[in-house]
Amino acid sequence: MPMNVVYRGPSDLPEVIPVFPLPGALLLPRGQMPLNIFEPRYLAMVDDALADRHRLIGMIQPNVAHPEPSDKPPLYTVGGLGRITQFAETGDGRYLIQLTGITRFRVVEELSVATAYRQCRVTYAPYADDFIARKGEELVDRRAVLTALEAFLRANNLKADWQGIENAPNEALVNALSMMSPYGPPEKQALLEAPDLKTRAEILVAVTEIELAKGKTPGEPPLQ
């Protein structure tokens, strides 16, 4: 989804952002993430984000390596920054929003703040390439991605819009499949932190093959 504001590099973005910890959340550059907001602290976060000209929210996963219960669980160090590009009220106190991904970020420190939601000082410098649309997509093994997708759909009796998939550029295809994938937080984090699109596609294929192998019966051939 096109945005009204163009972010050309890390210097265009604020150093302090609100963060929304959510297991399984994976927001990649130029991807779209719908969210149903109902907790008071996150309703306040959306209100404050809308009041700011950037309208930014950082999506980040709680770190599953530290599972102790807490209202402020430890966070992974890398998340995805998005801009609110759609907003609607439901009439029952909820917000329906959509974030459009801009870039990944690395947490420098979590701040002590008065807001009920959490805020972090972040850096975008390691992810300067995220601002370049479709960078490196010519290196993606598209056939391998589609083969893995087809096998996953077949194994789970699912259907897909193949015309839309075949028309999608490699970046949109890989990032959308990564965001929609049903895998756990560690796998989602690996997809997020992949250094480039080619590596993300390879991780996506590898994780899919591992999941499919778990359900195979002896003697079934591997994916080719």
Image (tube, rainbow, N blue to C red):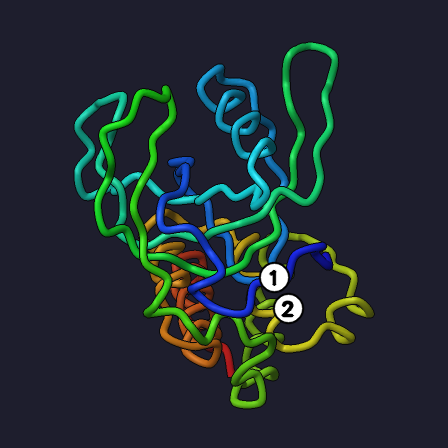
Q: Outermost residue, top direction?
A: 92
Residue 27 seen in render? yes
Local SS, label 2: helix
Binning the other alpha carbons within 10 Å of mark 1 as few (below 14), some (14 to 19) or many (20 upward) gives: many
The answer to whether mark 2 and mark 1 are in CB contact below 8 A is yes
- Please give the name of the residue rendered at 49% of the width and 17% of the height, measured from the top-left corner: 39
Q: Outermost residue, bottom direction?
A: 139
| Sequence order check, earlier mark of 2 and 1 | 1
Task: Look at the picture and state if 161 lies above or below 199.
Answer: above
Local SS, label 1: loop
What label does residue 172 carry, if any?
Answer: 2
For badge 2, the amino acid type reads Ala
For badge 1, the amino acid type reads Arg
Residue 22 seen in render? no
In whole angstroms, how far apart are the C-alphas of marks 2 and 1? 8 Å
Q: Which of labels 2 and 1 is toward the front? A: 1
Which of 34 and 162 lies nearest the eye of the viewer?
Answer: 34
Quadrant assignment, res 66: top left
- Where's residue 71, x and y in %? 27, 21
* Residue designated by label 1: 30
- Where's residue 67, x and y in %? 20, 33
- Please give the name of the residue rendered at 73% of the width and 18% of the height, measured from the top-left corner: 90
- Where's residue 196, x and y in %? 42, 77
Binning the other alpha carbons within 10 Å of mark 2 as few (below 14), some (14 to 19) or many (20 upward) gives: some
Which of 213 and 111 lies nearest the eye of the viewer?
Answer: 111
